Image (cartoon, rainbow, N blue to C red):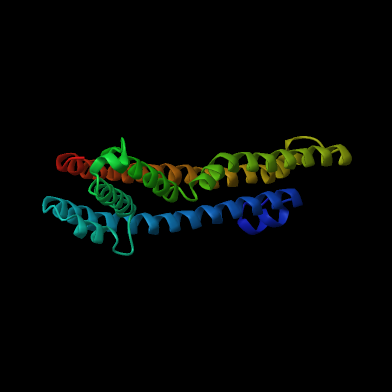
Amino acid sequence: MDFNLVSLWTQTSVPGKAVIILLALMGVYQLAVLIERLVTFSRADKRSQEFVPGLAAKLRDHDLKAALSLSQIKPQGPIAIVIEAALKEYMLGQKAQKTDGGSSDVGDFDLVDAVNRAIDRVKEREIANLKKGLSGLATVASTAPFVGLFGTVVGIINVFATMKVSGAGGIAAVAGGIGEALVTTAFGLLIAIPAVFVFNYFTSRIDSFVVDMDETSSELLSYVLREGR
């Protein structure tokens, strides 16, 4: 058996070819997720680096309207989206507390708690958006070796079935068939190993975004506490 791509393909059985095609589709999906998430995370990181210093300056100046306008500039990063929701909740809460009758009209309404809930709600949605495609990537990483192993098992079964029919024996008689069968396992590992690295890389990037969102949100909450409920 010649170990080059053309000969491997032509000598592989139909089930083996089906497994290779499936693994190839997994590889294409993995590449698509890699490119799309790299572009998305790069843009989000750039927008966050531009937004956070500007927000801090607006809060130092006590200019909430300017801070809200800054957070609404399109396209928005995940941090800006979270802060926009928090600022809107804060400003609506302030308006409710200043209506005729004062805070008695809103009962036990806690402005800081309302802002915190708005932050948590929108942050979870943004984290889910950042994780888009990663569940599929994890599936590729965990299942590709088993898909390749399935092709190997089927290939070895075919080898022994052929030996039984032909009556041939010895390692020389089965070496080619076993080598062909092991190709699918190798291909499965070739797809799975990069998928694990890519998944872990994007997971660490998401963790960084979460830290940034938490820090910026905490800065806004500190402002709300300083300004009073």
Whether residue 31 appears in this view of the structure is: yes
Q: Quadrant of the C terminus?
A: top left
Farthest residue toward the front?
A: 101
The front one of 164 and 70 is 70
The answer to whether 76 is drawn above or below residue 170 in the figure is below
The front one of 187 and 98 is 98
Whether residue 201 appears in this view of the structure is: no
The front one of 5 and 170 is 5
- Number of marks drawn: 0
Left or right: 194, with 150 as reference point: left
Seen at 71% across and 48% down, the residue is: 16
Left or right: 155, with 123 as reference point: right
The location of residue 220, given as percent across then percent down, is 22, 45
Left or right: 158, with 46 as reference point: right
Residue 218 lies in what quarter of the image? top left
The front one of 84 and 26 is 84
Residue 10 lies in what quarter of the image? bottom right
Left or right: 175, with 122 as reference point: right
Seen at 47% across and 50% down, the residue is: 132
Residue 6 lies in what quarter of the image? bottom right
Seen at 59% across and 44% down, the residue is: 188
The location of residue 182, given as percent across then percent down, is 65, 42
Farthest residue toward the bottom?
A: 74
The location of residue 97, given as percent across then percent down, is 25, 45
The location of residue 166, given as percent across then percent down, is 87, 41
Farthest residue toward the left?
A: 61
